[in-house]
Each structure stands twice: as structure tokens, then as C-alpha cells.
Image: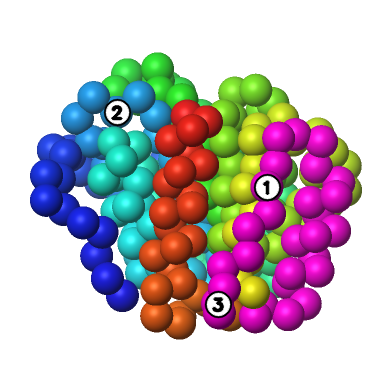
């Protein structure tokens, strides 16, 4: 996997944080480029974490564009051992809402525009949370996501401009994204990355997905 170009990388501040979410405490890392005006919260897929190499790569591309990022664990270690919990979309959505509340309460980030980036089941959580928060969320991107798991009602309520990125070889998931796309009433786009399967492991495909996401966020944040 290539790293993003860094001829003149922006100065960034890194902060390890703990997000309260009911009885749980969620570990995360907030990275803010100098003079950032926006921050993207990452919702990872089932069985993944804030250390997901794919999400950290996408986050680095966003940081190069001057966009802040928050990667955090949606589940505690004990919760993540329960397979069913990984697919509890309402729970994952509540965790993302808790992280959003933390961003809005933190003096360093409370004035920043907010976007969501979701992968796999995290995309459904991002869309449910965006549906609840309305115009407070400025943009959503799903990579290899399951937006259909957000539910028809939530999809119809999303106001944030939404980009669905899917691999052209991700058979089955393409159709599920098309179904979700048809239900969205917001500004929307469905992008197929040529030659990519579900995890974007093929050479160059994750880079294309990351730069598509960066363009969407740069345009809408």
C-alpha cells in the first residue's frame, strides 16, 4: 500500500482520547492538521478497530488535504468478542453519536464541520447517526459498506451529501449499495472502483477509494 504524497505535509497535532459512551469508555486518536476547518469521524467495520490499516491510510490522505480525523473503537474489547454485537447497528450508531457529542463539546473541535466515513457495517452506523443529526453532519462516505443495514427509514432521512464507494468486483455488495442509493433523498453519488474486491486489496484500488473520499469531503466540508 502506497503512502500519500508528503512533499509538504501539513503540521498536525495528535491526541489520544477516551470517549465516554454510557457505561463504556472508547479509545481513540484525534489528528488535526494546522488550521483544519473540519473533522471526519471513522466508523470501522465488524471485527476491526481504530487501528484498521485501511482506515488509517484513508485518514492520512484526508490529513494531507487539511482535514482532521478521529479514529476510535466503536466497541470495547469485551464487546468485540461477541460476534452479534459487531452487527448491532443501533449500538454502533449510538457510539458514533457519543463520539460526535465529544467533538462538539471539546473546545479544540467544537467549531469544526463534521463528516462521517464508514466501512462495512460502520457505514450503516454512520448513516443512522447522520439521519438522526440532520444538517449537523455535512458529508458521509461509505467504503465497501453495508448502507442497507441502516434501514429504509434512516436512509430516507439522511440530509448529508453521501458518497457510496464499492469495488467493481464486490458482487452482492454492489446490489445492496444500489438498493440503498435508491432510497437516499440527499445529494448522492455511487462510485465503482475498477478491479477492486470487498477489502480493496488489489494494487492501487485503496488509493483510488481514498482520493475519491478526500475529494468528496473537500467539496462538502
Q: Is residue 180 magenta?
A: yes
Q: x and y percent of residue 137 in the render?
A: 58, 30
User: Colour scheme in the image?
Assistant: rainbow
Q: Is residue 117 above or below residue 48?
A: above
Mark 1 = which residue?
189
Provide the residue span drawn in magenta: 169-196
Q: Earlier in the sequence, mark 3 or mark 1?
A: 1
- Circle 3 crowding by C-alpha within 10 Å: few under 14, some 14–19, many from 20: many
User: Seen in the image, is 80 located left or right of residue 56?
Assistant: right
Mark 2 = which residue?
36
Q: Is residue 80 above or below residue 107?
A: below
User: Seen in the image, is 61 located left or right of residue 179?
Assistant: left
Q: Is residue 197 above or below residue 142?
A: below
Going by the picture, which residue comes out furthest to the front?
194
Q: Dot 1 lies on which element?
A: strand
Q: CA distance from mark 2 to mark 1?
A: 25 Å
Q: Dot 3 lies on which element?
A: loop
Kindly tell me whether residue 91 is visible in this rendering: no
Mark 3 = which residue?
196
Give the quarter of the figure containing the N terminus: bottom left
- Circle 1 crowding by C-alpha within 10 Å: few under 14, some 14–19, many from 20: some
Q: x and y percent of residue 9 in the render?
A: 15, 45
Amino acid at each position: 500500500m502506497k503512502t500519500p504524497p508528503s512533499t509538504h505535509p501539513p503540521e498536525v497535532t495528535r491526541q489520544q482520547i477516551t470517549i465516554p459512551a454510557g457505561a463504556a469508555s472508547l479509545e481513540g486518536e484525534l489528528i488535526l492538521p494546522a488550521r483544519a476547518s473540519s473533522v471526519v469521524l471513522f466508523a470501522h467495520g465488524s471485527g476491526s478497530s481504530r487501528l484498521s490499516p485501511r482506515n488509517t491510510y484513508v485518514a492520512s490522505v484526508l490529513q494531507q488535504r487539511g482535514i482532521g480525523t478521529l479514529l476510535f473503537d466503536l466497541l470495547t474489547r469485551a464487546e468485540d468478542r461477541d460476534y452479534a454485537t459487531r452487527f448491532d447497528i443501533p449500538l454502533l450508531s449510538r457510539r458514533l453519536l457519543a463520539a460526535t457529542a465529544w467533538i462538539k463539546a471539546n473546545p479544540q473541535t467544537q467549531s469544526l464541520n463534521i463528516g462521517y466515513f464508514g466501512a462495512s457495517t460502520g457505514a450503516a452506523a454512520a448513516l443512522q447517526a447522520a439521519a438522526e443529526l440532520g444538517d449537523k453532519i455535512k458529508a458521509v462516505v461509505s467504503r465497501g459498506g453495508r448502507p442497507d443495514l441502516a434501514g429504509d427509514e434512516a436512509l430516507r432521512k439522511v440530509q448529508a451529501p453521501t458518497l457510496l464507494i464499492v469495488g467493481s468486483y464486490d458482487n452482492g455488495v454492489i446490489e445492496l449499495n444500489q438498493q440503498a442509493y435508491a432510497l437516499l433523498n440527499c445529494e448522492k453519488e455511487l462510485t465503482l472502483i475498477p478491479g477492486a474486491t470487498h477489502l480493496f486489496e488489489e494494487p492501487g484500488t485503496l488509493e483510488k477509494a481514498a482520493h475519491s473520499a478526500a475529494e468528496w469531503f473537500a467539496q462538502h466540508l
